[in-house]
Image (cartoon, rainbow, N blue to C red):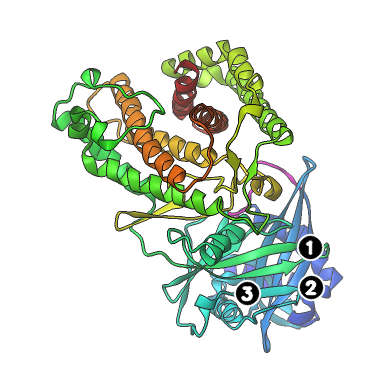
Amino acid sequence: MSENAKDSKLAAKYNFDVSWEELLDNKDFLNVFLSDVLENYIVKQRWFGGKSSKIKYIELAEYFRIQQNNEVYFGLILEVDFVEAFYHHYFIPIAFVSDENFAKKDRILPISIKNQEGFIIDAVNLEAFRKLVFERISNAELIDRTKVQYHKSELFSNIEYNSSKLLGLEQSNTSLVFNDKFVLKFFRRIFANKNPDYEMNRFLTDKKDFKNTPRYLGSINFIDQEKEVVTIAVMQELVQNEGDAWDVFLIEIDKVFETLEIKNIEIDNLPEPELYNSLRIHDIPHRIIDWVGLNLFLKIKVLAKRTAEMHINLGSEFEDTAFTPTHFNGDYAVWLKNRMIYQFQNRLNSIENNLHKLDKNSIEMAKDLLSKKSLIRSKFLKFDWTKLKGERIRVHGDYHLGQILVQNDDFYILDFEGEPESTIRDRQVKQPPMKDVAGLFRSFHYAIYATIFNNKDKFKQSENKLFKAAELLYGYFTGVFLETYINTVEQANLNIGYSQERIFMLEYCLLEKAIYELGYELNSRPSWAVIPLKGISNLINN
């Protein structure tokens, strides 16, 4: 049977004698749509975050119209309940089209409405829908008190729609590009609260004028039945760029490893830095500059400065309580310690169950970690948290090279949503700025080792020699970063604590991050488990 014949057969099966505008009020349609159709569609979507769990049922939590004159689309908020006794909420905008040419992608259901055959599709694929959303934001009133609230900044006035396209790069969200100048990000998994990406982006650019993140231009928020603000989408400027920092650093690091052979550098004779110790560029040994080159260290200095400036802006608010800095307290210390100990024990269990998957190098480090588990646990439990004098602020929360765009040797920071597995409320908890620094350091570590793993046939040195070079490079990267970062925040009077406190918080955050990574690698890429294990080994044997 041809695809057209199958679609006609399904459309005959799903035949409803109500108009499109009334369809979601029809109980017969909702019964089949929620039970027969949506599960098959949702589980295939890249943005669906419950692939490892079994869906129990799907409910239509709420819906609203996205319309202009007679042009009507629906925004669905779906509650997906899982057998494992938890649930997610997802947002899908839907459209009905009768022309198959408009239903090439994200076709949800062939359907007949009042005997007109057509398709329900994800509306983001329709230019008419994209244009309508653009115009609803660009024509938004200063204050919108309706259930679906469109907002625009002063920068987004008197702008006409020219073109739009779907940017098919992201997995957890969906981005639309307008006029080749603006990006609208639809959040797919949603929460009953303001999305931190919307909240932080608007704060940094509207209130603080931070230049190194895309400017906030507008948003769509929905007021749910509990009167909570649910962020549906955020509009930002499109930063013209040369790619993200992950790709740029991979290219640069690849050149660094090629230089080992080109210049016949003896790795064992290279001077080692003191790990996590601030290092000025002119104090880097000449042999290291000769190997790595000056340009890469200069890039790291700029990235450190932009990171510091982000934190300075996030830590300089004294009116908006969502952003005012706060000190460490007993409740936060308990929360942080419990979080670490839970994750740590969880990953230890994973190591013990997966030792058979690890290679020789990884097994030795894994056994070293298991032998020192009591020492590590006591280090964090026995630390006197009352000695912490620094301030906690709102932080990026999921800071790594993939969240940073590169433009003309400068860096632009994106995606302030925070850790994907955390609740929105956890993402809004004020944390030590060193959490972001640690996230970036782990990303440096991964970029260096990914260069080795992705080019095994290219580099002639032994794996052990390459690993030694990797650790040297990581030590110089982090030292140069810390020197610029700490000087910049201290000059702006952002209180990140005294020297020993900074080291403790950095080590705590690095260990937390590496432990999280270890669980991921053990489950999906055991051959890469050496990367987080090396990171943990640095901390417990430093």
**Most extreme residue toward the left, as rendered?**
263
Task: Decide which of 26, 531 is in the foreground and name it.
Answer: 531
Residue 455: quadrant of the picture = top left
Crowd rating for badge 2 (residues with CA inside 10 Å; few <14, some 14–19, many 20+): some
Per the image, label 2 sits on a secondary structure element best described as: helix
Per the image, label 3 sits on a secondary structure element best described as: strand
* Residue 1 shows in the view: no
Residue 183, image x, y percentages: 49, 68
**Residue tagged by mark 3?**
151
Q: Nearer the viewer, mark 3 or mark 1?
A: 3
Residue type, label 2: Leu
Q: Which residues are magenta?
A: 45-55
Sequence-first tag of 3 and 1 = 1
**Residue tagged by mark 1?**
60
In whole angstroms, how far apart are the C-alphas of marks 3 and 2?
26 Å
Residue type, label 3: His
Residue 55, image x, y percentages: 74, 48
Task: Decide which of 208, 55 is in the foreground and name it.
Answer: 208
Task: Decide which of 178, 120 is in the foreground and name it.
Answer: 178
- For the N terminus, which image quadrant? bottom right
Left-right relation of 71 to 273: right
Sequence-first tag of 2 and 1 = 2
**Residue tagged by mark 2?**
24
Q: Residue at x 79, y 79 (%)?
A: 22
